[in-house]
Image: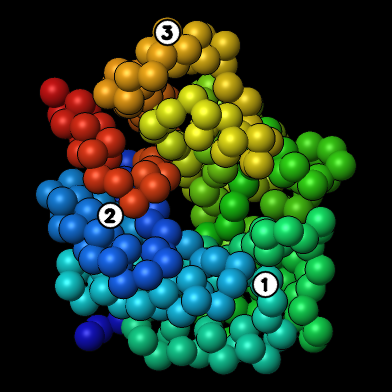
Amino acid sequence: MAPDRPLSDLFSLRRPLRSIEFFPPKDDSGVEALRQTAAALRSVSPDFVSVTYGAGGSTRQRTAQVSGLLRAEFGFTVMPHLTCVGHSRDELIEISDRIHGDGFRNIMALRGDPPKGSSGFTPAAGGLRHANELVSLLKARHADFCLGAAGYPEKHPEAPTAEEDLGNLKRKVGAGAAFVTTQLFFDNDVFYRFVDRCRAAGITVPIVPGLMPVLSLKQVQKFTLMCGASLPPRLVRRLEAAGDAPDIVEAVGIDWALTQIRDLLAQGAPGYHLYILNRAKSALALAAGLVA
């Protein structure tokens, strides 16, 4: 199979890109469910898909498995995630060589979250401490890698200040990241202010908004607590009014995300990235709503 096209080529087309994020399932039955989701989403024609990278061994192995499956069976351009967590520099070099040898040319380069139960991030022996170090390592090893970096419109939870967080992002871009995908947010003004701050700081690469259609109030409160994002009071009131009716909650979440996407594209965003939690329904509903 020919090497993938770098995403930087797609961004250069100056049209909105649609991307979808998958996470590697824990077992074979989950892989089959993911396969069914991918088959359903083929009709959406995403420009690329990404596959997350777990903090533990088994899910890391499945990142490669799922990436290969999505590429070979469905023809998707796949961007595997890679993190610093639990890896030495030599191991990261070995993994990057394998990714490159398999024909992948796009990687989301992340520091990564600490393993569950850990109080903070601790680099592995001989490992890397920051995402910009991973970006530098990957670009030095394979210059034709197109690398993405994570941005936090409402600040990384571990960053002391928004200014320091922005400085961290600038270092990632300076090391060779070709674009930024943001953590989820539910207020577009938060994204616009973040982009303005990035541009003022000299960060000129595309900044892709990351969105997650809400499936339940409890679930989204958990996610926002983990990543430092805020929930607009109006969205919370609408979800509370939906009560325990999952279909109504999902409809509220899709309507909110659809409104976000329409506004983002009207304001010139380079596309949007969907965190769909391996479920096809919301992505399909959003695609249908955007062409209605």
Identify the residue position indicated by label 3 in the image.
Answer: 241
**Front disc: 3 or 2:** 3
Left or right of 176, for residue 114: right
Closer-to-camera residue (194/258): 258
Left or right of 239, for residue 290: left
Using the numbered discs, state the Cα–Cα distance from disc 1 to disc 3 in whole angstroms. 42 Å
Inspect the image, locate mark 1, and give the three-letter code of the amino acid beneath it: Cys
Closer-to-camera residue (190/32): 32
Identify the residue position indicated by label 2 in the image.
Answer: 47
Figure quadrant of residue 254: top left
Q: Earlier in the sequence, mark 1 or mark 2?
A: 2
Task: Quadrant for the C terminus, please.
Answer: top left
Identify the residue position indicated by label 1 in the image.
Answer: 84
Q: What is the crowding at mark 2: few (fewer than 14 residues within 10 Å), some, or many (at least 20)?
A: some
Q: What is the crowding at mark 1: few (fewer than 14 residues within 10 Å), some, or many (at least 20)?
A: many
Inspect the image, locate mark 3, and give the three-letter code of the amino acid beneath it: Ala
Left or right of 168, for residue 58: left
Inspect the image, locate mark 2, and give the three-letter code of the amino acid beneath it: Asp
Tag 3's secondary structure? Answer: helix
